[in-house]
Amino acid sequence: MKNTRISFTFMAVLLVGLSWEQFVLGQNQLASPAALPFILSMANAQLSNLSSIINAELSSHFRFCSRDTDVDWNRAFNFSSNLDFLSSCLQKMNGQRLCTAAEIKFYFDSIILQAPPTASTASFLKLKLNNNCNLTSWASGCEPGWACSVGPDQLVDLTNSQQIPSRIHDCQACCDGFFCPQGLTCMIPCPLGSYCPLAKLNETTGVCEPYLYQLPPGRPNHTCGGANMWADVGRSGEIFCSDGSFCPSTTQKIPCDNGYYCRKGSTSQNRCFKLTSCDANTANQNIHAYGVILLVGLSTVLLIIYNFSDQVLSARERRLAKSREAAANSAKTTAKAQQRWKAAKKAAMKHASGLQVQLSRKFSHVKSSDTEQFKILDQSKSDMDNDLSTSYSRIPTTSSASSVPIEGRTDSQTGHMGMIHEIEEDHDDHEGLHNETRNEKGIKKHVPKGKHSSTHSQMFQHAYMQLEKEKVQQQENQNLTFSSVIKMATNPENKRRPPIEVSFKDLNLTLKTKNKHLLRCVTGNIKPGRITAVMGPSGAGKTTFLSALAGKAIGCKTTGSILINGKNESILSYKRIMGFVPQDDIVHGNLTVEENLWFSANCRLSVELSKADKVLIVERVIEFLGLQTVRNSLVGTVEKRGISGGQRKRVNVGLEMVIEPSILLLDEPTSGLDSSSSQLLLRALRREALEGVTISMVVHQPSYTLYKMFDDLVLLAKGGFTVYHGPARRVEEYFAGLGIHVPERVNPPDHFIDILEGIMTPNADISYEELPVRWLLHNGYPVPADLQQISARHTTSMADVERTNGTSNHVLVEPQPSLAGELWQGMRSKVEEHHDKLRMLLKTKDLSHRRTPGILKQYKFFLGRIGKQRLRDSRIQVIDYLTLLLAGACLGPISDLSDQSFGVYGYPFTIIAVSLLGKIAALRTFSLDKLEYWRESSSGMSSLAYFLAKDTVDHFNTVIKPLVYLSMFYSFANPRSSFTDHYVVLLCLLYCVTGMAYSLAILLQPGAAQLWSAIFPVVLTLFITRPQTSSAMKTLSNLCYPKWALEALVTANAERYDGVWLITRCGVLNGSGFDIHDWGQCLLLLMVTGVIFRILSYVCLLIVRRK
């Protein structure tokens, strides 16, 4: 029991203080007034020696409310600085009236074991009866403020803790600086911070002021004595040095001077801060001015950030835009000059050929004409480029019909032609960007590899030069002959990506929870360099088919085989070179178009690519997708308008194109696009196919122009059956063989989908339900049993089915499961789903042979992206900070941080406010971009880098928010503990609740997560502040994080109370169950809890996915 510990502790403390009194009293008969100072100094020295002897015992019993017993002893009972009260008492005292160890123990046992004080009993302290004060013997010394001595020949052992000595002689009023409890006939020194003068009788009320006890009736000679008790501030507040005064000794009270303040129980006055108002006799400094200044200053800064936060990133974007525009203009000018030069060169060669013919006709009779002819040919082929100045002066161009003599050339013309030569020579020099730089005189200077110093302008110029060259090459390729096509296809310089061919045979997908078939008997392949369109009516399983190819069909039972390049390997082994474009436009709305593309390129392209190559890739995608005009525009969110829907769709595709994939799967990329945008997108995909990329896309009723751009077609019927799979140009031929002809002026895909939907009836003796069977029979595939009934009407078809399958016609009827069976099946499928996710996560081997950035580099990229997003969303942060300011300003004045409770009843409001506001703000970290994360993680980006970057950016709020809240709360509440103590506790509290908010945001939907974030801090804080009766409830209370935060705040505040506050401090900590040594442990528990919840959040981040 802590009560026994407290009583024994105070007995030991006061025993040390009184043992040296025995030495003084023993010398009382021999000491003269002149020798009194020497006796007092000797007694004080003996006191110091005795305190060190029992220090170990004090530490063991006084531990829960004293961090350092030596320090607390000195602050409470070190009277060495002023012994006037002791010398005065010794001069007028006859006999030994000081309490022994037994009497001190008896007194403090009565204090601690007594019920807590109330408003009606706060001033009364009733001690138990003893041998001096009982029903038969009640001396004057038993009254409050009085004490008696032992007999004249009797010696008292002050260290005796077992027996109370008999004290009924020579009863007198208690000395100044001592207190004499009612029911005891001895006196105890008052601790420092108290004021214990002799009481004075108030004739009107009959009360001995300031101690509020009355004279005993029937004793006319009895007068008011000294102080009557020392207990907690609620029961003995009258002996505490009053507010606005300080007491350097227990018999002296001095009012506070102007510019100083004195709290209750002070031994010295404290200087007020500047800008604060401290009049004379002030108990506390008024620092509201600091609160107002901080409120105005922080509000102004936050409003500036609220209105001008976008300017930080906009200024940088404008600088990059100017550099990029200059590089683009330079590249276009150079490309135009090169085109003009090539046209002139072509015209010169044409004129040389004509001159050769004329010369051969004129000199055909001369034998040497052959030799001259070859010389002319050699000149036209080899000397034409080297001696261009000579030939250009004589040969007319397309814009000049007459030749110009060589003598007529000027130096400017020579310089111009030299520049054109240099343009043509340097245009194809790709390595010059990395290995060469030019000084101010234009001389090339070699730069060692690995020490590139390319600027943004140089990289943009390199990219746009290459783009202009590709445009010219594309125009030239439109009129190529067959031999030129063969030459271009076999050119080793043409870049082609690693080919991936996906083959699937008898592919079936069944939903585990409902046992519903999504795909049935799908067989075929998707080849590199070709665009395969997947079409069909709604519910045909187009997206499911694409998800199965991408390895994303989780929660489904898959049968059949999917081969990658003829090998039984998982497509997830190639996810670093696989692009998957989802049907929804999952793009970061608070990033620009270019920032979205650059982030995908940085995290997913090979680390071996240089920055210039990445610039070229990104610029090429922006150029071919037609996003130049909106590259610096925000994509936009639901609340904030951004680019158009069609442009957003193209950005969605561009995120996968910038990684230069070998296989690209797209789910309805043209939905919502107009005809021109769709054609622009298909041209970009066609360019990807020319590089050997395997492309498959779900298309919903394309136009005829788009339809003609597809190479292959997969047509699915309802139920996931294949109706056609082959070249797109032969689909009409196949259906014509079935008697289904496309009417004139009707788009073939629309006609086929209407038939499969059942809207139109084919003009043939066949129904749309028979089309899957006809395709299976056409290719010789086995027909499932449930489809044999459909074709039973056709004898021929039925016979083919019998021969193919060798089975009889029957229908399987599956029994319906019970409710318990459905629940069990659902739980089992859920466990299997998570098992499949973990298996794919842990056992998938990378076969893409592309080394992408590691965790540290991706962490850097994520950190930059999240930082930009937070800057653009700074208005939300400003609102959070303003809310904290308002909460601190409101809770500061109303929080009960009084001296009686040390904040036990006031700090819970702070814990609730900081926890609630911190959790709700931290929910946005992971709840707003779940879809974006799922897409990025499935593509191979590091989940750990993503999580660490999010948490790192949130550390800014964890550090700043306690400062914002305390700037108001501390100014208005003005507690005794320091600002630093409060800040450290709230910092650890915010770190803890932020980790909890991560888990709620990942596991729950946004609405439910907000609800639980509000409920948890309120309920747990109210729970830990209620008295706990059972041990189980106490254990549960000790496991709640508000208990740790409250204990840290209260103990930090209690440590500032010393001297006369020692009993109050121990009583409050004992009643609350707190230990003053647990301050660091509470902070450690908060931090460890935050780490544990972060680990749990990361595990949930890996497992939890959208259904």
Image: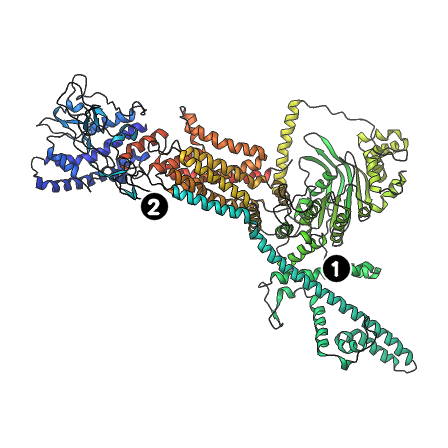
The residue wearing badge 2 is 273
For image coordinates 67% across by 22% down, the residue present is 818
Horizontal placement of 241 versus 321: left or right?
A: left
In the rendering, at what x and y percent does residue 1032 appear? Answer: 43, 26
In the rendering, at what x and y percent does residue 173 appear? Answer: 15, 28
Q: Amino acid at mark 2?
A: Phe
C-alpha separation, residue under disc 2 versus residue under disc 1: 73 Å
In the rendering, at what x and y percent does residue 102 appear? Answer: 20, 27
Horizontal placement of 976 versus 997: left or right?
A: left
For image coordinates 76% across by 66% down, the residue present is 339
Q: Quadrant of the N terminus?
A: top left
In front: 2, or 243?
A: 243
In the rendering, at what x and y percent does residue 898 appear? Answer: 35, 33
Q: Quadrant of the C terminus?
A: top right
Residue 780 visible to the viewer: no
For image coordinates 60% across by 71% down, the residue present is 440
Q: Amino acid at mark 1?
A: Lys
What is the secondary structure assignment of the residue under circle 2? loop
The residue wearing badge 1 is 471
Q: Earlier in the sequence, mark 2 or mark 1?
A: 2
